Image (cartoon, rainbow, N blue to C red):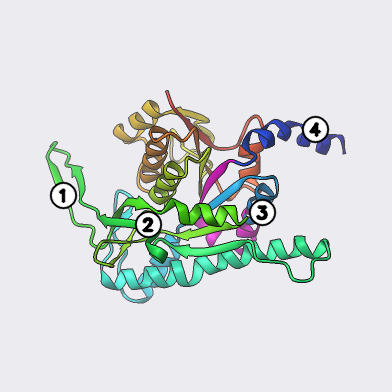
């Protein structure tokens, strides 16, 4: 019992610091494939909400999209962690993100919320989570991404990723109105361009842009590894704290690869845009969000300015 009391005392200054602050959390990886793992994460989300934090969720769904693509006879293709997206892939992406995963997360939050309310004898509890995409109300205006990279010979080239976009503008008032109403927005990363065309957006990038636009206190990216690793094959090589400059060097030197690149780039962008702290941590560790936010040591990688 004393250990539980001590844990609460350790959390107290963090609860005070983050009360009333906006925190962006991006869900992705295996937690979206497991009902049990997802429930643990969503319990953390509801608890942070009850502690007075304003939570905005963004979710990916890469594994589910790739599985459906394979079923349709399409081989998934990526360029440095970004999915090449044609018309057929876009249809699958919309079905999985907006039609399935978004609603799964919303229902999961509301189920936990209803159970909490019923303990307080509320006969008709009001739902907590609201699911939307970046297309709804033109929440996220985007434009086609012109992706540039450098070859091994030092030549800069452009790669056509298809219907992949980058964020131009976010309607923050729509999100703030939901937060003022005491809701948790759950956002699927699909944007809309000036011609009304849907564009696939990287969920990590969307989370970073939301964090900047909403002046969030923190950005948290959940993944399948403990954080940023010096050796991708060694979980014990976790880097607990990174400056922006150190993160940029890890990318330049090729220490981080594939899906970790857009995550680190998103954190760098967020920090440079005014977000105080960014965190990359494992969603496979039970209650990792609480451990990262409300304890002294944390469990993942924290990216800071400097």
Vertical comparison of 6 with 132: above or below: above
Q: Nearer the viewer, residue 52 or 219?
A: 52
The residues colored magenta run 21-41
Question: Helix, strand or loop at disc 4?
Answer: helix
Q: Quadrant of the N terminus?
A: top right
Which dot, 3 or 4, sits closer to the camera?
3
Residue pictured at 58% horizontal, 65% vertical: 106
Q: Is residue 161 left or right of residue 3?
A: left
The residue that disc 1 covers is: 158
The reply to whether the C-beta atoms of the residues labelled 3 and 1 are less than 8 Å apart is no
Marks 3/1: CA–CA distance: 43 Å
Residue 191 lies, in percent from the top left, at: 35, 60
Earlier-in-chain disc, 3 versus 4: 4
Quarter location, residue 200: bottom left
Label 3 crowding class (10 Å Cα cut-off): few <14, some 14-19, many 20+? Answer: many
The reply to whether the C-beta atoms of the residues labelled 3 and 2 are less than 8 Å apart is no
- Residue 140 marker: 2
Marks 4/2: CA–CA distance: 43 Å
Residue 12 lies, in percent from the top left, at: 73, 33
Earlier-in-chain disc, 3 versus 2: 3
- Residue 46 marker: 3
Which dot, 2 or 1, sits closer to the camera?
2
The residue that disc 4 covers is: 6
Residue pictured at 29% horizontal, 73% vertical: 88
Label 4 crowding class (10 Å Cα cut-off): few <14, some 14-19, many 20+? Answer: few
Marks 1/4: CA–CA distance: 55 Å
Question: Helix, strand or loop at disc 1?
Answer: strand
Marks 2/1: CA–CA distance: 24 Å
Does any portion of residue 33 appear in the rendered image? no
């Amino acid at each position: 019992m004393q250990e539980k009391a001590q844990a609460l005392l350790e959390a107290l200054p963090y609860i005070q610091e983050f009360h009333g602050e906006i925190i962006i959390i991006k869900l992705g990886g295996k937690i979206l494939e497991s009902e049990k793992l997802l429930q643990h994460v969503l319990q953390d989300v509801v608890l942070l909400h009850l502690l007075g934090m304003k939570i905005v969720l963004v979710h990916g769904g890469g594994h589910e999209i790739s599985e459906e693509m394979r079923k349709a006879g399409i081989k998934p293709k990526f360029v440095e962690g970004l999915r090449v997206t044609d018309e057929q892939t876009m249809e699958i992406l919309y079905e999985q993100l907006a039609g399935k995963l978004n609603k799964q997360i919303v229902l999961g939050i509301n189920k936990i919320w209803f159970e909490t309310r019923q303990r307080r004898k509320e006969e008709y509890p009001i739902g907590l989570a609201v699911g939307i995409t970046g297309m709804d109300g033109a929440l996220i205006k985007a434009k086609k991404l012109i992706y540039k990279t450098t070859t091994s010979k030092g030549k800069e080239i452009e790669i056509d990723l298809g219907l992949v976009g980058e964020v131009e503008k976010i309607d923050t008032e729509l999100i703030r109105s939901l937060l003022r109403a005491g809701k948790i927005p759950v956002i699927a990363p699909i944007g809309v361009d000036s011609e009304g065309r849907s564009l696939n957006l990287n969920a990590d990038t969307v989370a970073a842009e939301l964090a900047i636009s909403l002046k969030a206190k923190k950005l948290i990216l959940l993944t399948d590894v403990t954080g940023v690793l010096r050796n991708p094959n060694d979980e014990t090589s976790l880097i607990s704290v990174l400056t922006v400059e150190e993160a940029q060097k890890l990318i330049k030197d090729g220490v981080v690869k594939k899906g970790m690149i857009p995550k680190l780039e998103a954190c760098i962008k967020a920090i440079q845009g005014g977000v105080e702290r960014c965190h990359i941590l494992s969603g496979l560790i039970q209650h990792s969000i609480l451990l990262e936010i409300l304890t002294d040591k944390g469990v993942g990688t924290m990216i800071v300015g400097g």
